[in-house]
Amino acid sequence: MDLDAALAVLAEEGAPNYRADQIRQAISRDFITAWDEASTLPKALRTALEERAPVRELVLEEQQYSQDGTVKARFSTHDGFPAEAVLMRHGDRHAVCLSSQSGCALKCTFCATGTMGLGRSLTKGEIYEQLLWAARTARDRNARIRNVVMMGMGEPLQNLDNVLGFCRLANDPDGFGLGARSIAISTAGWLPGIEALIAEPMQVKLAVSLHAPDDVLRTELMPVNKRYPIAELMGMLERYREETRRRVYVEYLLLDQVNDRVEQADRLADLLYKHLPGGHHVNLIWYNPTGSGLNASAPERVERFQAVLDKRRIPYTLRRSKGSDIDAACGQLAVKGAAAAARAAKRAEREPA
Ligand code: SF4
């Protein structure tokens, strides 16, 4: 959904100013799926909007429903690239995990998306449309979206303009009206993007996937670490913390016998005390296997890891895996659309726009 394009149509059609509020309301509050549903607009304007700024640019290809209330959607863009979003229920609260890119260039070894390579970055409208899907799905349960995490396919900070453009749309008090602090941008540690966020006035949350407390293991799991090793990453996070006073959320995927030893928990605590004293929160994440050969930590290993963090007084939350009975891990569902993405990429190479 390209709201700017819709506003341009209003201007081209010489529509009065109040129509802009009506289209914002129709898109972001009523969650229309086609302009014909916007009954406050005259028919001729609805037709012009549908032709030049359609409400839905993404095609919903597939939805999967988990017994725990998680719903996963796979979309394709108008040029054939897959994207996915996951709606999660935590008690009566609903959160949605969105994709910022189709595929991803960073190739983390535990991640299904990483096997696809990068198709292309998504536009802010394509990201917003995933949120609107989630809002409609939640509305069917009489619920609202309370939180957004940019933790689906892609590295959000490699598509920062569109991601921030999306955040502004979601945050617009005359539109969707989601508080900036209810939006979390999750990065694998793309330093130029973190630096740009230091200067960003919108108070979105920053989550950083660490997943290992030493460079050898982190590079093995996340090749981006070769370019931006832990010392540089933590140095940038220190700057982020000092200049914004915002907390940093540290994501740590628990991988059986890989990064879940007690010494590793201790090293993680050391890093956080050294670089982010009083300004961190760890999210321990139960791994949802993706066929990578890596497994979720055994419960007793998770307990031992937690015991170290407890002893070291590191604030943390243990996040249970959502949608483990469907393809809910990052990229699992969209990987099924990867062949289509590869075809679309080849087509785009042959026929540049
Ligand atoms: S974990 Fe995130 S950054 Fe890493 S490959 Fe997957 S989508 Fe990309």
Image (cartoon, rainbow, N blue to C red):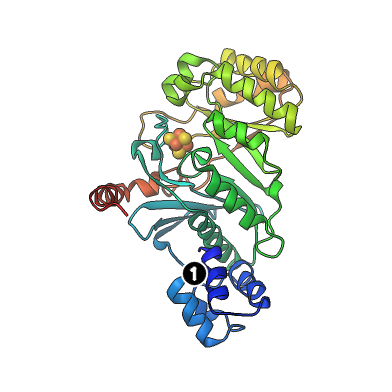
Is residue 339 among what the camera can see?
yes
User: Residue 115 at what x, y percent from top left?
Assistant: 34, 36
User: Residue 234 at what x, y percent from top left?
Assistant: 62, 21
Of residue 165 and residue 351, the one placed in the foreground of this image is: 351
Horizontal arrangement in the rendering, residue 339 relative to residue 266 (left or right): left
Of residue 229 and residue 70, the one placed in the foreground of this image is: 229
Disc 1 is placed on an element classified as loop
Please give the name of the residue rendered at 43% of the width and 49% of the height, measured from the top-left corner. Answer: 326
In which quadrant of the rendered view does residue 244 lie? top right
Is residue 252 among what the camera can see?
no
Amino acid type at circle 1 is: Val
Local packing at callout 1 (Cα closer than 10 Å; few below 14, some 14-19, many 20+) is many
The mark tally for this picture is 1
Residue that sits furthest to the left in the current view = 350
User: Residue 274 at what x, y percent from top left?
Assistant: 70, 15
Horizontal arrangement in the rendering, residue 207 relative to residue 326 (left or right): right
Quadrant of ligand 1: it is top left
In which quadrant of the rendered view does residue 8 lie? bottom right
Q: Give the vertical position of 72 relative to 208 (above or below).
A: below
Of residue 124 and residue 275, the one placed in the foreground of this image is: 124
Pick the quarter of the image with the C terminus. Answer: bottom left
Please give the name of the residue rendered at 44% of the width and 24% of the height, measured from the top-left corner. Answer: 221
Residue beneath label 1, please? Answer: 55
Does the beta carbon of the residue at mark 1 sit less than 8 Å from ligand 1? no
User: Residue 305 at what x, y percent from top left?
Assistant: 60, 22
